């Protein structure tokens, strides 16, 4: 073991520690996906089986689906594995925030930056459910470190990974590619390959899976209730939501921070999300989390570099005061994830006790409540488009509560056979 440890570089030690922490987090907060990751897991399994149907689901994302295809052989463990990977990326983002800021200010600034990123809006909740926004932060900061260490190809790989997670990263990848094109003529062939591969990986699978190359874009323009796109002025609503993400002292300090590139990149990301909201895209606050995290880091660096000790002390006290209420949200995340874990586990058992997948599908089309379509499709191993939300006979109604205090949906049909297990009621009307 000593020889193995000696062979590992410090960065590998850090990576092992990050994954160990992600695995350990499962004990505290159940590792169960949310809405979008269930779709990626479903599509990944379909890709692994040589089929793909993206019709009826959320927007397609190439990198998560590719990873989920690799996880598909794990069977029932695949959802947990995906969430563990997502949490590892989130923990990695916090660690990288510390490293990036420490290089500029010392350990104090690094610690403040790490806290600022970890408590940036719904960062913890997104990481807990396997969302991609914390991954984007991780890859952005990994790219920053690679560039500072004179490893441009590694930085490019991180930039491409970001662009395969969120389309908001495309303009940044284009700008970075232009810099590399000018500075590194030997990489121009690689840059051309990336320029072809990124859009191809977004559009070709969607074309093969739904027949509509722009389906994901159309789906992204159907916002959920309460999102900025539905406001009177979506751009302003999106900016207002984004401004509430970082801790206020860090946001203010970011405007005067010497880490101008981080601050400008964060502002540009948030502005892009807001402009997209004005154009009809949802503009959800979680989409702005990567930009807000960069602003939090810039603010942390700015506070750590304050020359006036009294001013720095006041700023740190303000940060601590604002940290306390956000720590309470961790308990809410745990309670929510515990419920979602029961929801997913009870669904598998309810299907089995109701006669099994094949028997239910012979009865007719499955119907479930809103936002539970991907979970239901994954549990029944059917294409997402086959799951409906307005029950009709003959068919199968899978009724539950989306949250612990939400109403049971969808409504059951008159007659039929009903089986209740845990959080689910399964009604067959054959």
Image (tube, grey):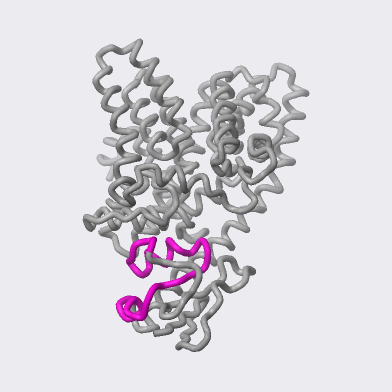
Residue 245 to residue 407: above or below: above
Point out the stretch of residues depicted in magenta.
Answer: 357-385
Is residue 343 positioned above or below 415 on the image?
above
- Residue furthest out toward the left: 50
* Viewport quadrant of the N terminus: top left
Is residue 400 shown left or right of residue 385? right
In front of the other: 250 or 429 = 429
Q: Percent position (x, y) of residue 111?
A: 58, 34
Quarter residue 138 falls in: top left
Taking depth in this image into account, of 300 and 356 the one nearest to the observer is 356
Say if 223 sits above or below 14 in the image: below
Residue at 35% x, 46% y is: 212
In the image, what residue occupies the spot 39% across and 77% down? 351
Rendering coords of residue 392 (x, y %): 47, 76
Circle count: 0
State the residue at coordinates (44%, 71%).
Answer: 345
Q: Position of residue 154 (x, y in %)?
A: 33, 27
Q: Quadrant of the C terminus?
A: bottom left
Report which quarter residue 113 is drawn in.
Answer: top right
Is 412 left or right of 174, judged from the image as shown? right
**Residue 323 lies in the magenta stretch:** no
Residue 424 left/right relative to 119: left
């Amino acid at each position: 073991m000593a020889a193995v440890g000696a062979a590992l570089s410090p960065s590998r030690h850090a990576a092992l520690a990050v994954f160990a922490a992600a695995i350990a987090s499962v004990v505290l907060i159940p590792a169960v996906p949310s809405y979008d990751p269930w779709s990626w897991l479903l599509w990944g399994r379909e890709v692994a089986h040589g089929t793909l149907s993206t019709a009826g689901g959320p927007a397609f994302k190439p990198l998560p689906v590719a990873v989920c295809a690799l996880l598909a052989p794990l069977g029932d463990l695949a959802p947990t594995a995906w969430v563990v990977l997502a949490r590892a990326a989130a923990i990695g983002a916090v660690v990288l925030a510390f490293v990036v800021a420490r290089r500029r200010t010392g350990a104090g600034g690094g610690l403040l930056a790490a806290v600022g990123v970890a408590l940036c809006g719904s960062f913890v909740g997104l990481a807990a459910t396997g969302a991609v926004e914390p991954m984007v932060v991780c890859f952005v900061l990994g790219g920053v470190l690679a560039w500072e260490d004179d490893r441009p190809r590694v930085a490019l790989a991180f930039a491409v990974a970001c662009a395969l997670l969120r389309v908001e990263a495309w303009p940044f990848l284009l700008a970075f590619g232009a810099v590399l094109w000018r500075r590194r003529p030997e990489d121009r062939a690689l840059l051309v390959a990336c320029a072809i591969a990124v859009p191809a990986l977004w559009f070709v699978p969607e074309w093969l899976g739904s027949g509509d190359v722009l389906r994901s874009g159309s789906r992204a323009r159907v916002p959920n209730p309460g999102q900025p796109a539905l406001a009177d002025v979506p751009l302003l609503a999106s900016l207002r939501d984004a401004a509430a993400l970082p801790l206020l002292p860090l946001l203010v300090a970011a405007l005067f921070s010497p880490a101008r590139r981080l601050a400008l990149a964060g502002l540009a990301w948030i502005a892009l999300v807001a402009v997209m909201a004005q154009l009809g895209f949802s503009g959800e606050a979680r989409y702005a989390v990567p930009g807000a995290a960069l602003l939090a880091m810039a603010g942390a660096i700015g506070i750590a570099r304050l020359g006036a000790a009294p001013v720095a002390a006041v700023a740190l006290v303000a940060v601590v005061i604002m940290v306390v209420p956000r720590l309470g949200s961790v308990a809410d995340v745990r309670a929510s994830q515990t419920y979602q874990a029961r929801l997913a586990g009870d669904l598998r058992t309810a299907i089995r006790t109701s006669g099994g997948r094949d028997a239910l599908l012979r009865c007719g089309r499955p119907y479930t409540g809103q936002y539970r379509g991907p979970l239901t499709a994954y549990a029944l191993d059917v294409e997402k488009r086959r799951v409906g939300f307005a029950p009709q006979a003959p068919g199968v109604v899978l009724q539950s509560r989306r949250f612990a205090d939400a109403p049971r949906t969808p409504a059951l049909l008159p007659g039929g056979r009903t089986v209740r297990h845990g959080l689910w009621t399964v009604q067959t009307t054959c």
